[in-house]
């Protein structure tokens, strides 16, 4: 009896040890440089052709992935599962996939012409790389790390947004006045949604309407995933799109030449920076009406939200304009520098700090949203074009 | 009894084990390079694909019922071999990573039979990288060259698709360094070194298209050039008498052309000049109303002559919060800037609906304005200007103005601007002091309300003025950029003269540079004589 018990115990222990030895998690062969991908700011350096990783706590560059000369990476993004960091090399016509922990370049995938902005499906399976000059989106399977398809028929696709259920993706066409709807299951263009009519007076103004087109930058999704809002720069409108029926629900007229919508983190408002008249329009999403139009700066490239305020980046003036999102009134202006060019910023997940790319100074500006004080982290790479933090609500590019 | 239970348990365990063994199998493989050389420490990952009919997006955020994707990892040993034991049947993606090599991946179907795979990795070559990772992995030089040729061929294809300038750019940058007593330069602060600004060339690898280069050069040239603008307007008005005596059924026209010059002189310092020429006969020559019926008349000094209307320098201090403008000015451009009734070129044509009549500024003159705008809700302005062309010295006929402005969003309405101003005049005029308020408040995104009030002190009494009206934009219009409005203004002078003026206008924005407006005014004056006029009008404006 005792022997049988011993045999049984030994058998079970042996099975457990064997199973553990077979299925044990293995450490990567390479050195782990970023143990927790949520703790770094990714910086895309256009001229040094690399992605720099800055530790949020120490503000030190903990790693850098060189992509190759003349790659000119444009936008960086981490996959939602935190496994990969990807970027499109605008002048190399390639997509670059980096291991998020070891920071090793694991794959270089040829895509279409001038890849810029990109998006991930919510399950991290599909990486959509927009190619504005190729008028296409390259679909990359993140399981096999291969380009499985190219979606043609778009017109300068600038930004793509997935629905939360991953069933459809919406593409802003900057070279047209319609939003493209992509069936993610088949990776095909399903539908074109025209955001607004071109006014009849346009025929009197061929220079404006035929010379150059500034259409739709991005269809931005609401926090609840129920609607999308897309600006049309030429037409000066925001279109509210119902994704259930893929139709325009409402058209909201905002300031002149709105760049794109930015959603406030509480889901109450969206802001459009209007570069045509140097104002911002704050749209109340409960009423779908412009709640305030306030003076802003020139060449605005982004809006971030933190500490109950909106921070509007005026690229060439070197200012960040601040607005109180409770009173909807101006709340000051921060002078970041003289003769500098600011790009875009990301906000940390606590909504406390902004990380703003300061391209001409090769710096990232860390802004404390509450005090409106800032600190410059120099030598992050040459010409930092944008920043990204995993799970930030303000991850965007320009 | 106990023995029989134990035996049953053992039998069940063995049965389960044997059943499981019959269901699952082993996936193994060996990782090597193209020449067959073993690659040690490669990481192999086996990831289960969702079964047919499964939701298309597993592992989705906010959907906890969906299982995380099944994934197992194994590291190849020194012989390049790896093994996954006890793999359930199904479809999997097997991918293998190794430092210095491109990832390989393949879909495999696992059944009951064990599988042994041969994995070949291709070296990953990063153009421009100082070290070829593949070389470090010991791949033969020939293979590297072949791979390089392949890569170059791909690059030529890319270049064919787009003409680009491939040479590295050099760019001069402003940098801050620390220079010690021996003139040694340090990048970081060191003891005894002073912080200095210098300039240094930097080599960057931004490949630009020829178009981008040309656009950049044109923009730089434009930035340095003197900018010239033109605002040419023709206003035609008719006048029909509605009451009293005076000219009747008359037509009037006034043509105006402004030439603007602007240039950047230094950091935050700019120059602006406006030269204007007017020609024609406005109704104000014949109709003796208290206020001008054509706001352009204020600019008319001499017919068919060029006049310098404005010429000033502006510079900014303290983080560009404080601006100082000095030269020949029009102070009404800085004070009482009502959003809906402050521009005779696109809004109301009546001067009573362009400026607060109690500001008392008749003509432009030499002056200075300081405006402090911290870009919060408040802003402050002070300024003075000589408003008498016959003044013999700068100290004569000086109008001093101060204003406090506030931006508000009251009662959940859109933005509104509220101003309070005070004026003092040292000239030999009756009115020494005046005070006024001005507001423009949006009632909705499309409708704006405006109002003004002002009063000036004259010996023993006050002259009073007020105006109000509504303005419409973006809605209830023919074209999206059209605007229209209705306004009313009233003057009550201490001397007993009174004026009621009403105006409506519609402004068509035909193109970016061309506007056409229709106006209808009615003025009723009670001076020594009582008279009233109805004035339909048309305004054509080209601005570019």
Image (cartoon, rainbow, N blue to C red):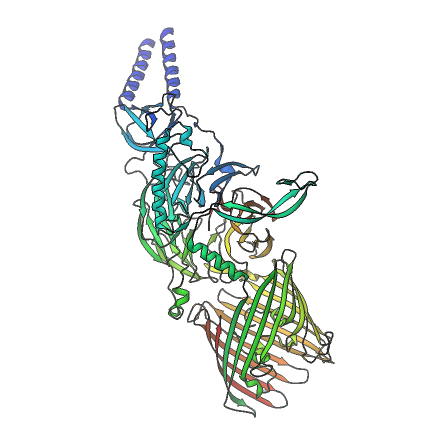
Q: Is residue A160 above or below residue B130?
A: below
**Residue A351's spot in the image, x, y percent?**
54, 45
Q: How many marks?
A: 0
Relative to B407, is A374 above or below?
above
Q: Nearer the viewer, residue B187 or B269?
A: B187
Relative to residue A204, is residue B294 drawn left or right? right
Question: In the rendering, at what x and y percent does residue B41 appear?
Answer: 40, 25
On the question of residue B335 being in view, the answer is no
In the shown orientation, is residue B531 left or right of residue B120? right
- Residue at image position (53%, 58%) is A298
Q: Nearer the viewer, residue A353 or B155?
A: B155
Is residue B133 visible in the rendered image? The answer is yes
Q: Which quadrant, please, contains the N terminus of chain A?
A: top left
Image coords of residue A382 (percent x, y): 51, 44
Instruction: Return the x and y of residue A216 as percentages of the image width and height.
Output: 40, 56
Instruction: Please state if B507 lies on the left or on the right of B162 as rendered.
Output: right
Answer with the quarter of the image where residue B338 lies: bottom right
In the foreground, A7 or B422: B422
- Front-lying residue, A155 or A15: A155
- Give the quarter of the image for residue B454: bottom right
* Image height of B352 relative to B241, above or below: above
């Amino acid at each position: 009896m005792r022997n049988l018990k011993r045999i049984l115990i030994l058998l079970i222990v042996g099975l457990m040890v064997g199973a553990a030895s077979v299925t044990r998690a293995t450490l990567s062969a390479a050195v782990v440089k970023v143990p927790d991908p949520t703790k770094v700011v990714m910086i895309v350096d256009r001229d040094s052709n690399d992605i720099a990783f800055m530790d949020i706590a120490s503000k030190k560059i903990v790693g850098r992935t060189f992509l190759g000369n003349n790659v000119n990476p444009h936008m960086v993004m981490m996959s939602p599962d935190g496994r990969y960091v990807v970027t499109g090399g605008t002048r190399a016509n390639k997509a670059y996939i980096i291991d998020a922990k070891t920071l090793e370049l694991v794959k270089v995938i040829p895509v279409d012409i001038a890849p810029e902005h990109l998006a991930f499906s919510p399950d991290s399976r599909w990486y959509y790389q927009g190619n504005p000059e190729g008028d296409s989106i390259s679909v990359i399977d993140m399981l096999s790390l291969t380009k499985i398809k190219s979606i043609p028929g778009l017109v300068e696709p600038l930004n793509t947004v997935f629905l939360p259920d991953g069933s459809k993706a919406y593409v802003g066409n900057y070279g047209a006045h319609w939003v493209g709807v992509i069936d993610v299951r088949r990776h095909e263009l399903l539908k074109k949604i025209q955001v607004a009519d071109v006014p009849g007076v346009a025929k009197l103004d061929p220079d404006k309407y035929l010379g150059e087109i500034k259409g739709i930058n991005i269809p931005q999704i609401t926090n609840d995933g129920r609607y999308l809002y897309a600006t049309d720069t030429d037409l000066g409108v925001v279109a509210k799109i119902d994704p259930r029926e893929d139709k325009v629900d409402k058209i909201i007229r905002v300031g002149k030449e709105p760049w794109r919508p930015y959603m406030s983190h509480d889901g109450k408002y969206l802001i459009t920076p209007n570069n045509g008249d140097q104002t911002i329009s704050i749209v109340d999403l409960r009423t779908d009406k412009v709640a305030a139009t306030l003076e802003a700066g020139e060449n605005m490239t982004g809006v971030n939200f933190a500490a109950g305020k909106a921070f509007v980046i005026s690229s060439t003036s070197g200012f960040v304009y601040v607005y109180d999102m409770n009173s909807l009134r101006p709340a000051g202006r921060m002078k970041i520098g003289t003769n500098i060019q600011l790009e875009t910023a990301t906000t940390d997940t606590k909504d406390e700090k902004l990380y703003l790319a300061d391209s001409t100074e090769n710096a990232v500006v860390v802004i404390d949203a509450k005090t409106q004080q800032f600190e410059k982290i120099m030598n992050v790479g040459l010409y930092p074009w944008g920043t990204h933090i995993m799970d930030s609500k303000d991850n965007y590019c320009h | 009894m106990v023995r029989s239970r134990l035996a049953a348990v053992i039998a069940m365990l063995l049965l389960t084990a044997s059943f499981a063994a019959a269901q699952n199998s082993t996936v193994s493989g060996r990782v090597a390079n193209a020449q067959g050389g073993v690659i040690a420490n490669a990481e192999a990952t086996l990831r289960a694909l969702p079964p047919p009919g499964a939701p298309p997006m597993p592992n989705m955020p906010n959907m906890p019922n969906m299982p995380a994707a099944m994934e197992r990892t194994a590291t190849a040993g020194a012989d390049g071999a790896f093994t996954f034991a006890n793999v359930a049947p199904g479809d999997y993606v097997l991918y293998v990573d190794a430092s210095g090599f491109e990832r390989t991946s393949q879909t495999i179907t696992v059944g009951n039979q064990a599988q042994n795979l041969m994995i070949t990795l291709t070296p990953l070559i990063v153009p421009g990288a100082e070290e070829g990772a593949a070389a470090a992995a010991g791949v033969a030089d020939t293979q590297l060259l072949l791979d390089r040729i392949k890569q170059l061929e791909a690059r030529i294809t890319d270049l064919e698709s787009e003409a680009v300038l491939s040479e590295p750019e050099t760019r001069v940058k402003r940098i801050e360094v620390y220079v010690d007593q021996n003139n040694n330069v340090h990048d970081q602060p060191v003891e005894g070194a002073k912080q200095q600004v210098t300039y240094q060339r930097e080599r960057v690898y931004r490949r630009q298209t020829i178009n981008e280069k040309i656009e950049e050069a044109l923009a730089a040239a434009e930035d340095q050039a003197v900018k010239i603008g033109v605002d040419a307007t023709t206003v035609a008005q008719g006048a029909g008498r509605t009451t009293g005596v005076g000219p009747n059924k008359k037509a009037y026209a006034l043509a105006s052309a402004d030439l603007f010059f602007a240039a950047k002189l230094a950091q935050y310092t700019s120059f602006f000049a406006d030269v204007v020429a007017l020609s024609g006969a406005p109704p104000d020559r014949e109709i003796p109303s208290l206020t001008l019926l054509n706001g352009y008349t204020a600019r008319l000094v001499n017919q068919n002559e060029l006049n310098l209307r404005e010429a000033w320098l502006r510079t900014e201090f303290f983080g560009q919060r404080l601006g100082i403008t000095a030269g020949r000015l029009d102070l009404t451009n800085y004070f009482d800037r009502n959003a809906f009734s402050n521009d005779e070129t696109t809004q109301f044509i009546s001067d009573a609906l362009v400026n607060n009549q109690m500001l008392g500024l008749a003509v432009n003159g030499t002056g200075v304005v300081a405006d402090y705008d911290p870009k919060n809700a408040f802003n402050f302005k002070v300024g003075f200007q000589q408003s008498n062309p016959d003044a013999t010295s700068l100290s004569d006929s000086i109008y001093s103005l101060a204003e406090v402005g506030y931006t508000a969003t009251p009662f959940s309405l859109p933005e509104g601007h509220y101003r309070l101003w005070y004026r003092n005049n040292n000239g030999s005029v009756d009115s020494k002091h005046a005070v006024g308020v001005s507001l423009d408040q949006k009632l909705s995104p499309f409708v704006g309300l405006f109002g003004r009030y002002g009063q000036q002190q004259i010996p023993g009494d006050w002259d009073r003025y007020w105006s109000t009206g509504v303005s419409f934009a973006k809605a209830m219009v023919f074209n999206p950029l059209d605007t229209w409005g209705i306004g009313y203004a009233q003057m009550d002078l201490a001397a007993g003269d009174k004026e009621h003026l009403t105006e409506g206008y519609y402004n068509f924005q035909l193109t970016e540079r061309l506007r056409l407006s229709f106006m209808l005014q009615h003025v009723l004056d009670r001076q020594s004589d009582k008279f009233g006029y109805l004035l339909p009008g048309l305004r054509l404006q080209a601005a570019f």
